[in-house]
Amino acid sequence: MVDVSASHLQQGRAINSAIFKHGPALFDAVKETILKEATVPAAGGNAAHKANQEKLLATIARICEQGQWNPTLSKAQFWDTAWGRIVYQGTRADKASKEIDSMRQYPLFGDIEAFDQEDYQFDKAQWEAFAAHWKRRFEWYKLVQRFGPAKAQAVEAKRGGSWMDNTNAIPWGAVAEDWAALADMWSKRVRKYANWLDFAKGQGELWDESLQGFGSHYPSKALDIMTKSGDFAGIQFSSHPEKMKKYLDVAGFLKSASDTQILDFYVGPSYQHEVVHTIGAEYLRAKERFETIHKKFREHFGYITSLHLMMDLGFMTVKPDRVLTYLFSRLGWLVTLPKSLSKEQVLRKYTDERVVQEVLHRADVLAASLVDHCGTPYTHRLLDIWMVKFGQEPEEQFGITVNLEAARPNAMERLYERVEQRMASAPVERGDAEERWPSAIAFAPLTSRGGPRPGKARHAATAPRSARIRPAQKTREQEKLEEMHSFYQMNKQSLPATIRNFRDEIVQLMMAGLPVADAFSQVQRK
């Protein structure tokens, strides 16, 4: 059991009070700054700047309108929204937007009716073994190209790697590698390849033979997507096996369901959707209902991806991604991730469920503060999109040309300081904001020794001075650690010895949604 001090409970109530008081003014300042400074074209020009501003406003208005609750949503409409949210998982927004535009032009993604289970056979473990096989070959090819066949093996041996030892490595298929023959063949080539897949597809018979290793799962349109071949040649697509599995799982569910069952599966047939910003005990009950629905979405989607999708479907939530979480931390709005932490420290922990829960809680308060100010109850979607655009990479679709937070470190913090100074004497309106939004979880800094574990606590309004939190059975981070350890044990003969020095970085990549094999590969490329 870990004590959560009364000071943390008091700090949380004070944060809510400050958010409710300053939220509308900060929101206006953020919008004004983005429109004025984040839409300036690189080449300059007032006309181009104005065009970017108009594009941003029009795109946000369209997204907010599309993001309202639709009880008659068809499975085709649900699919069109759902697979795009999977694309965003662990991928930069600008890259994800381009992939979505491309994927929409191809079978399956453009039409759920194009899905047939038999045509889209896919085994995640098979793909990971296949990819590891070709990544090993690609590493050997690069060594041969750089040093020649005579020195390549000596160089690899000096690096301490044993992945070339066929008695220890896990080959793809039944035949061990003849590295000498491959070295002789590849030493006669001069072509450079962008990545392992580009390399693999350029190997003629070797490539064709390796595809036969998929057995009954080949040919398959799912493999065509992953390899960007056949009907899917030219598709912009991140070939993450975990994402592919999710696409197919959701497609299979939707194909077997009738239109009337789609939302009922997640919310239940008796669900009544209301966009009401509740307070007190009713707020706690609303959060419990929300968590029940969120748990149902997680049967098909990841923890944060589910929240992203729910927001786009009209639920009262935000997407607690790395950008929003970091900005909330810099504003001093998170007990779990104090303002004193660096950006690197925040990004290491932003997927922790305790952090996610606090970001959602503070966003509820900010959204409530904006209802009268913005003249709409749909303020969660509004605040999410504007706040995120402050710290997001340039995105042509929105007319955003500058990441303000990156270009001007602590820019959001400076804005907030000016708002606080301007409103120093202004009272909190409409009652005591400190007591309006109790939390079922008592938040404490993750940096505290031992660190709190998620669990129920009496809500902040009545919690004792020594509120205690029940320990979680197993956190997502622990699960990822176990998955990473298992992958390492299975593949350690083909991994460099130094990979063990990057354990924390690998886990954080996995927490952000990257499959374990890709997390290892990304760290190795650095």
Image: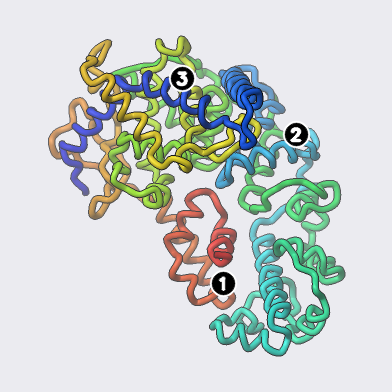
Q: Residue at x 73, y 53 (%)?
A: 226
- Identify the image quadrant of residue 159: bottom right
Q: Amino acid at mark 1?
A: Asn
Q: Residue at x 56, y 86 (%)?
A: 158
Which residue lies most toward the left here? 465
Residue 504 seen in the current view: yes
Q: Give the number of the disc on residue 112.
A: 2
Q: Amino acid at mark 3?
A: Thr
Mark 3 or 2, nearer chain start: 2
Q: How is the image coloured?
A: rainbow
Q: Residues within 10 Å of mark 3 (few under 14, many from 20)?
A: many
Q: Is the C-beta separation of discs 1 and 2 under 8 Å?
A: no
Mark 1–mark 2 distance (CA, rounded to whole Å):
37 Å
Secondary element at tag 1: helix
Look at the picture and state if 371 lies above or below 292: above
Provide the residue designation for mark 1: 491
Mark 1 or 3, nearer chain start: 3
In depth, the one of 397 and 319 nearer the eye is: 397
In depth, the one of 73 and 411 nearer the eye is: 411
Residue 110, position as x, y percentages in the image: 77, 34
Q: Is the C-beta separation of discs 1 and 3 under 8 Å?
A: no
Residue 236, position as x, y percentages in the image: 73, 46
Q: Residues within 10 Å of mark 2 (few under 14, many from 20)?
A: many
Mark 1–mark 3 distance (CA, rounded to whole Å):
48 Å
Residue 82, position as x, y percentages in the image: 63, 34
